[in-house]
């Protein structure tokens, strides 16, 4: 069924690979760029994918925003998580609609948005952040992505404990994740997944040692790279600029203790 743009909808205005804009459609508003202005009201009732000319007759395309668009256009006070890492975190965590997930810390809410997108409509993300200014910024980004209903923002330090129990997954993006491992073991359901994102290998070693000490199994650590291609007949090659190292991702699953050996 064809989806039409309505007043109040978000559109992703595409000019070229380097110039894109996420804007809300309002009947009486215009959006100004260095390539002229666009009357946003002219988009109302049009199909997503419609081309629209600016006041300088430069053509833009009005796309329906994806999760990736919301993440890259989020308001940033901290470094965002990159899609190359987010996609692997989501896949390895095993979360789906109905999953209950704890995340720490919230940061910009980029990873929070991705988790919420996959656990909705029946699941919930409980995201902990110690810095109130980050939490307020993340709330705005989640509202803009229409995902706040599936998230509970919590001000707190998970190194001191996790309030939720029977969780499907715990996802950590913080400076001292190894201090959370004992609390994570108690909060996860059996076979639940823990994911830890760390920028340095020293952090990874401490996390893995703590996981091994607390009856976690299936422990793996990976690093991801993605390289875009410049495609043109006769001169196709990898792009010279790429996002290199961002961090190491450690995955593990909770194993229940072995049953006691019966006495003779």
Image (tube, rainbow, N blue to C red):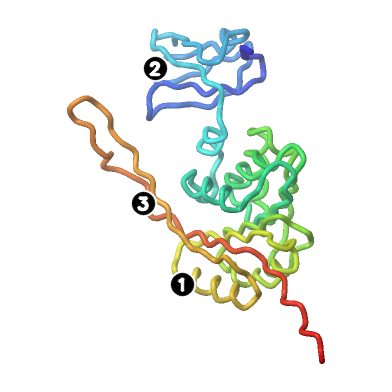
Location of residue 61 with respect to 143 vertically, above or below: above
Q: Quadrant of the N terminus?
A: top right
Give the mark toward the camera: 3 or 2. Answer: 3
For the residues labelled 1 and 2, say whether their Cβ atoms are less than 8 Å apart: no
- Residue located at (79% from left, 61% from top): 165
Residue 234 % position (x, y): 17, 27
Q: Is residue 86 left or right of residue 147?
A: left
Name the image quarter holding residue 196. bottom right
Seen from the viewer's position, the closer of residues 34 and 171 is 171
Seen from the viewer's position, the closer of residues 174 and 86 is 86
**Label 3, on which residue?**
244
Location of residue 20 with respect to 129 vertically, above or below: above
Residue 254 % position (x, y): 67, 66
Circle nearer the N terminus (3, 2):
2
Seen from the viewer's position, the closer of residues 244 and 36 is 244
Badge 3: residue crowd in 10 Å (few <14, some 14–19, many ≥20): few
- Residue located at (71% from left, 39% from top): 120
Q: Is residue 135 left or right of residue 149?
A: left
Location of residue 69 with respect to 63 vertically, above or below: below
Label 1 to label 2: alpha-carbon separation: 48 Å
Circle nearer the N terminus (1, 2):
2
Label 1 to label 3: alpha-carbon separation: 19 Å
Q: Give SS at disc 2.
A: loop
**Label 1, on which residue?**
202
């Amino acid at each position: 069924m064809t989806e039409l743009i309505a007043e109040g909808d978000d559109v992703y205005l595409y000019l070229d690979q380097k110039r894109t804009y996420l804007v809300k459609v309002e009947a009486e508003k215009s959006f100004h760029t260095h390539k002229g202005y666009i009357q946003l009201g002219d988009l109302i009732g049009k199909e997503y994918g419609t081309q629209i000319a600016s006041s300088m007759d430069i053509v833009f395309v009005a796309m329906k925003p994806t999760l990736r668009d919301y993440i890259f256009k989020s308001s940033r006070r901290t470094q965002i998580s990159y899609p190359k890492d987010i996609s692997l975190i989501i896949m390895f965590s095993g979360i789906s609609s109905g999953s209950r997930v704890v995340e720490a810390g919230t940061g910009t809410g980029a990873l929070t948005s991705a988790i919420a997108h996959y656990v909705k409509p029946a699941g919930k993300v409980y995201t902990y952040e110690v810095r109130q200014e980050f939490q307020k910024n993340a709330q705005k980004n989640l509202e803009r992505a229409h995902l706040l209903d599936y998230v509970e923002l919590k001000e707190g330090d998970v190194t001191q404990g996790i309030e939720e129990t029977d969780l499907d997954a715990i996802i950590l993006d913080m400076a001292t994740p190894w201090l959370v491992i004992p609390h994570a073991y108690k909060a996860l359901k059996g076979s639940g997944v823990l994911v830890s994102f760390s920028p340095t290998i020293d952090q990874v070693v401490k996390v893995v040692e703590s996981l091994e000490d607390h009856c976690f199994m299936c422990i793996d650590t990976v690093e991801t790279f993605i390289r875009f291609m410049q495609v043109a007949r006769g001169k196709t090659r990898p792009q010279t600029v790429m996002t290199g190292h961002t961090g190491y991702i450690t995955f593990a699953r909770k194993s229940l203790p072995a049953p006691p050996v019966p006495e003779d």
